[in-house]
Amino acid sequence: MELLLVRHAEPIRVEGGHGTGPADPGLTARGRDQAGRLAAWLAHEPIDAVVTSPLVRARDTAQPVAAALGLGAEVVDGIAEWDAGSDEYIPVEELRELKDERWHAMIEGRWVDTGGVDPSVFQAQVVPAFEELIGRFAGQRVVAVTHGGVVNVFTAHVLGIDRYLWFHPEYTSVTRVHASRAGVRSIGTVNETAHLVATRTDAPSEVVP
């Protein structure tokens, strides 16, 4: 089977300390545009199922994809992000640019320091979730809308590398994993963004006060 791992589209930035529980933002204007372009691109592929992380930014990305394919989007709890319980959502791109301490904690594996779980624990949750999908959809092509950390730890497992965060998935990028009934797992492509590059616009991000 072929598993298309999709990072969600661009979400709204949420500062910590808002006091309303875990941050679970929807998409910016640019993010909605990215999701629409992804949906139009994947509409030309024979997709059998769409699954999504329970977080809003993933579900809002999966919805137009599923609609374009005439499918529903099944929520799979096991492919939520490692910091799903955090009270803030600051895009990793911003943290990296500013060389924020939270960025250093992330790449050094100190995820607990930023409201997440230990990387090894997280990977041990993610891998069985995908293996369950592989078993259930044997011989089919499945889109899984999820998160950058999820894509990283699962592909690291497939490749047999000991780095949990080894590449930067772009918003709505597609990474393809091939899985045989014999148990062989391999990477087909990493970080496809042709649907954005071929139809690029300058749609602005939504301004959040």
Image (tube, rainbow, N blue to C red):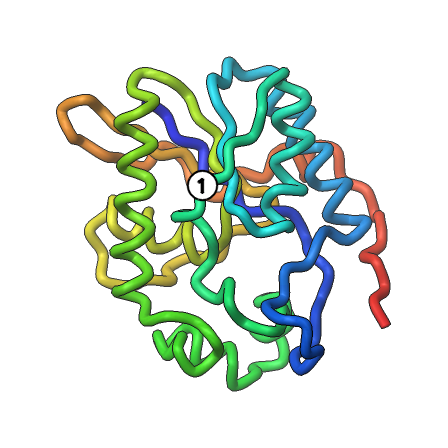
Is 185 left or right of 92, judged from the image as shown? left
Q: In percent of the image, x 58 and y 24: which residue is there?
A: 72
Left or right, residue 43 beside residue 204:
left
Where does the image place residue 132, in percent across and percent down from the top left?
A: 29, 35
Q: Quadrant of the N terminus?
A: top left
Q: What element carries label 1?
A: loop
Q: Where is residue 173 in the image (x, y as percent from the top left)?
A: 55, 42
Image vertical order of residue 166 relative to residue 183, above or below: below
**Which residue occupies 71% across, 66% down?**
13
Picture coordinates of residue 124, whole percent (x, y)? 25, 56
Residue 113, horizontal then vertical, whole percent: 43, 82
Q: Which residue lies furthest to the front in this view?
A: 20
Residue placed under numbered mark 1 in the picture: 76
> Which quadrant does the C terminus fall into?
bottom right
Q: Which of 45 and 86 is in front in this view?
A: 86
At 50% across and 52% down in the image, what residue appears? 147
> Looking at the rendering, which quadrant does residue 149 occupy?
bottom left
Dot 1 alpha-carbon crowd within 10 angstroms: few under 14, some 14 to 19, many 20 or more: some
Q: What residue type is labelled 1?
A: Val
Q: In which quarter of the image is residue 68?
A: top right
Residue at image coords 71%, 78%: 18
Residue 40 vs 205, above or below: the answer is above
- Indicate the quadrant where residue 22 lies: bottom right
